[in-house]
Structures are given as structure tokens and as C-alpha cells.
Image (cartoon, helix red, strand yellow):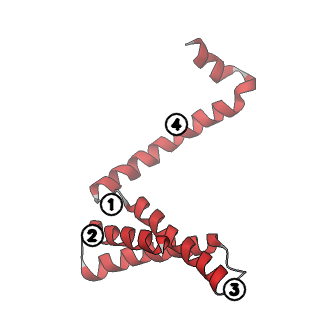
Amino acid sequence: MQALQQLLFDDSLFFMRQALLMGLLASIPFGTIGSLVVARRITYLAAAIAHAVLGGIGFSLFAKFQWGWAWLHPMAGAMTAGILSSLLIGWVNMKYKAREDTVIGAIWSLGMASGLL
């Protein structure tokens, strides 16, 4: 109890007090969004996009060293791959009415495989 009082009222722990406050404030929308993600069965969407980003990084490094595109930064490839993968997941879901799990799994494996190449 004394540690909590020190955290809340000691001026030398301003950063920790702000971190606690931001964590409490962030828990409300994150809990709501988390419930929506579980209800729509897209729980591993973030992991699929992260693995697709790996493919974008791999492509940008390949283009940089193989084709001499010195201006191409890996972050640009990562952002492009992340945006394209999310657009592709949304497009396939709307056009073909497939379950989002199926499309997300395909993007995950495609991104990981292209990143390894």
C-alpha cells in the first residue's frame, strides 16, 4: 500500500504516474476493440499483417541490393506490404464472401514465404 501511495503522490515518479494513467485510459477502448476482434474471428490479423510486412522488407532489401535501388528503404517496403495485405484481406472478404480466417491465413503464409525468399 505504501508503494502505491509513493507512486501516486511522489513528484520524482511523475513518469510512472503518467504511465499508470495512460494504461487505465487505454484499457477502455482496447477492451472494446478486443471484444469486436474476437467476435468477428479475426484474432490473428495482426500477426498475419506482421508476417506480410516481413515480405515487404525482404522485397525492398532485394531490390536495393540486386537492382541497385539505393533510394528504397526497408520501412517503405514494410508499410507498402502492410497496407496492401490489409486491402487484399478486405477485398477478398467483400468480393468472395470467404471467411476472414481463411484469407488471413493465406496472407500470413504468403508474407512469411516471400520474406524468407
User: CA–CA distance between discs 1 and 4?
Assistant: 25 Å
Q: What kind of element bears circle 1? A: loop
Q: Nearer the viewer, mark 3 or mark 2?
A: 3
Q: Nearer the viewer, mark 1 or mark 4?
A: 1
How dense is the environment of label 3, judged by Cα within 10 Å: few (below 14), some, or many (20 and up)? Answer: few
Please name the residue that numbered disc 4 is placed on: 24
**94 sits left or right of 48 in the view:** left
Residue 69 is situated, as x and y percent measured from the top left of the image, at 69, 84
User: CA–CA distance between discs 2 and 1?
Assistant: 10 Å
Residue 11 is situated, as x and y percent measured from the top left of the image, at 74, 24
How dense is the environment of label 2, judged by Cα within 10 Å: few (below 14), some, or many (20 and up)? Answer: few
Which numbered dot is residue 102?
2
Q: Nearer the viewer, residue 33 or 76?
A: 76
Relative to 38, residue 93 above or below: below
| N-terminal label among 2 and 1 | 1
| Cβ atoms at labels 2 and 4 below 8 Å apart | no
| Cβ atoms at labels 2 and 1 below 8 Å apart | no
Say which amino acid is labelled 2: Thr
Q: What kind of element bears circle 3? A: loop
Residue 14 is situated, as x and y percent measured from the top left of the image, at 71, 30
Relative to 16, residue 100 above or below: below
Please name the residue that numbered disc 1 is placed on: 42
| Cβ atoms at labels 1 and 4 below 8 Å apart | no
How dense is the environment of label 4, judged by Cα within 10 Å: few (below 14), some, or many (20 and up)? Answer: few
Q: Nearer the viewer, mark 1 or mark 3?
A: 3
Residue 79 is situated, as x and y percent measured from the top left of the image, at 57, 71
Say which amino acid is labelled 4: Leu
Which numbered dot is residue 68?
3
Q: Nearer the viewer, mark 4 or mark 3?
A: 3
| N-terminal label among 1 and 4 | 4
